[in-house]
Amino acid sequence: AQTVTQSQPEMSVQEAETVTLSCTYDTSESDYYLFWYKQPPSRQMILVIRQEAYKQQNATENRFSVNFQKAAKSFSLKISDSQLGDAAMYFCALTQGGSEKLVFGKGTKLTVNP
Amino acid sequence: DTGVSQDPRHKITKRGQNVTFRCDPISEHNRLYWYRQTLGQGPEFLTYFQNEAQLEKSRLLSDRFSAERPKGSFSTLEIQRTEQGDSAMYLCASSFSPSTDTQYFGPGTRLTVL
């Protein structure tokens, strides 16, 4: 069975600073994909970044980057130059090739302080 | 591209009543997913369709739950004889196969069972 664990229920960061959100996962498959989704209060979930397990290079999207440690089954999200609009719940998720369903962690609530 | 839409956005019902939710995916997407999200938790997979075929169902989907996608476009999720434990946010997502592509989420339907 696949599991995703987010050990930080809440995190806070000062505006313009950098913050890292942690995620660990477990899967017996070699073909899988990892995602970070953002869910602002009362708004819909949007994709932040995705990583294919077969790629060694860490994914980046503007101010968002991941540290993908395949052997350790770790997939952390780094947000640089944090902005007030980054405040949201962040969910780490995993899908196996051929299964397609997403398995989510419990989320990390990020607060950005002005 | 108008994104994934869901209707209604909010539904309040009494225990024992039947409810039906609708999801309209992004037009070119052939895969459609339903998830349930309770307060403080990440979304949990319920079921998914490829075109009109329902390919996977979670054990969370009891006999009281049924989902359809009759023409491979919109989908409905019906809950019969609602219980207070059914209160949750019901999320719909869509993606394009054959590749494992990103799932795009709708705004959700919040169900409250009194």
Image (spheres, rainbow, N blue to C red):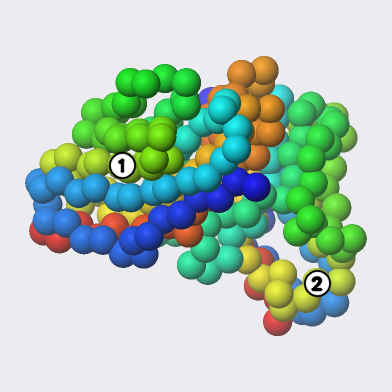
Could you tell me residue A41's position as x and y percent? 39, 59
Where does residue B73 sit, x and y in percent of width and height?
76, 30
Residue B5's spot in the image, x, y percent?
61, 42
Residue A35 falls in image quadrant: top left
Residue under the image location 37 percent in, 21 percent down: A56
Relative to B60, is A71 on the left or the right?
left
Question: What numbered label is drawn on residue A32?
Answer: none
Q: Identify which residue, B13 or B52, lies in the foreground.
A: B52
Q: Residue furthest bottom?
A: B114
Judging from the image, what secondary structure is the residue with disc 2 in? Answer: loop
**Image vertical order of residue B18 relative to residue B56, above or below:** below
Screen quadrant of the C terminus of chain B: bottom right
Which chain is indicated by disc 1?
Answer: A
Residue B74: give x, y in percent of width and height: 75, 36
- Amino acid type of the residue that numbered disc 2 sits on in the rendered structure: Thr
Kindly give the residue lying farthest to the front in the view shown.
A71
Q: CA distance from mark 2 to mark 1?
A: 38 Å
Query: Mark 1 Cα within 10 Å, few/some/many (few <14, many 20+)?
Result: many
Asked if A15 appears above or below A65 in the picture, the reply is below
- Residue sitting at 15 percent across and 60 percent down? A113
Task: Respond whether the residues carrying marks 2 and 1 are from the same subunit.
Answer: no
Q: Is residue B3 above or below residue A12?
A: above
Instruction: Name the amino acid, label 1.
Output: Leu
Which label sits on residue A77? 1
Q: Along the line of sight, which residue is nearer the eye, B90 or A99?
A: A99
Q: Nearer the viewer, mark 2 or mark 1?
A: 1
Q: Could you tell me if residue B10 is visible in this image?
A: yes
Residue at the location (46% across, 54% down)? A5
Q: Decide: few, some or many residues near mark 2? Use Cα within 10 Å; few <14, some 14-19, many ≥20.
A: many
Q: Which residue is mark 2?
A: B82
